[in-house]
Amino acid sequence: MDFQDYEKIFESYPSILKITDLTKMLNIGKNKAYNLLKDKSIENIKIGARYKIPKKVVIEYILKIQDEGKNHAIIE
């Protein structure tokens, strides 16, 4: 799958995501999501106590993991 395929899959999500959107998109728990944001595996902007994540960055992360062939809890 490529970037455009994932854009279509996630078209119902906003361009700037919240942590709850990220957990749904990647099918992961909140703790795992926060860890991905804190260690900058997924680029983000922190405003106060809230994380804002560009949707395109999440798609790029999925493609990176897909290319690396790692077995992560993401879309099947």
Image (spheres, rainbow, N blue to C red):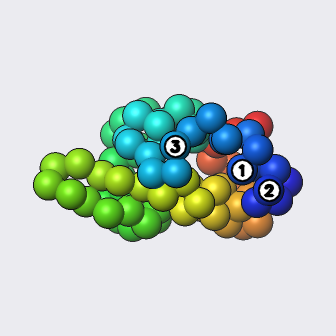
Left or right: 73 as drawn, with respect to 7? left
Residue 69, numbered label: none
Q: Position of residue 20 (x, y in %)?
A: 41, 34
Q: Is residue 61 above or below residue 10?
A: below
Q: Quadrant of residue 66?
A: bottom right
Left or right: 32 as drawn, with respect to 38? right
**3 or 2: tag closer to the N-terminus:** 2
Left or right: 53 as drawn, with respect to 31? right
Q: Dot 3, crowdedness within 10 Å: few (<14), some or many (≥20)?
A: few
Residue 14, numbered label: 3
Q: Dot 2, crowdedness within 10 Å: few (<14), some or many (≥20)?
A: few
**Label 2 belongs to which residue?**
4
Q: Nearer the viewer, mark 3 or mark 2?
A: 3
Circle 2: residue type: Gln
Q: Secondary structure at mark 3?
A: loop
Q: Residue at x 55, y 62 (%)?
A: 57
Circle 3: residue type: Pro
Q: Dot 1, crowdedness within 10 Å: few (<14), some or many (≥20)?
A: some
Which residue in the rendered view is the most extreme toward the left? 48
**1 or 3: tag closer to the N-terminus:** 1
Label 1 to label 3, Cα distance in Å? 11 Å
Residue sitting nearer the eye, 12 or 61: 12
Residue sitting nearer the eye, 70 or 10: 10
Q: Position of residue 41 (x, y in %)?
A: 46, 64
From this viewpoint, is residue 30 visible? yes
Q: Secondary structure at mark 2?
A: helix
**Label 1 belongs to which residue?**
7
Q: Residue at x 74, y 49 (%)?
A: 6
Q: Is residue 48 above or below residue 74?
A: below
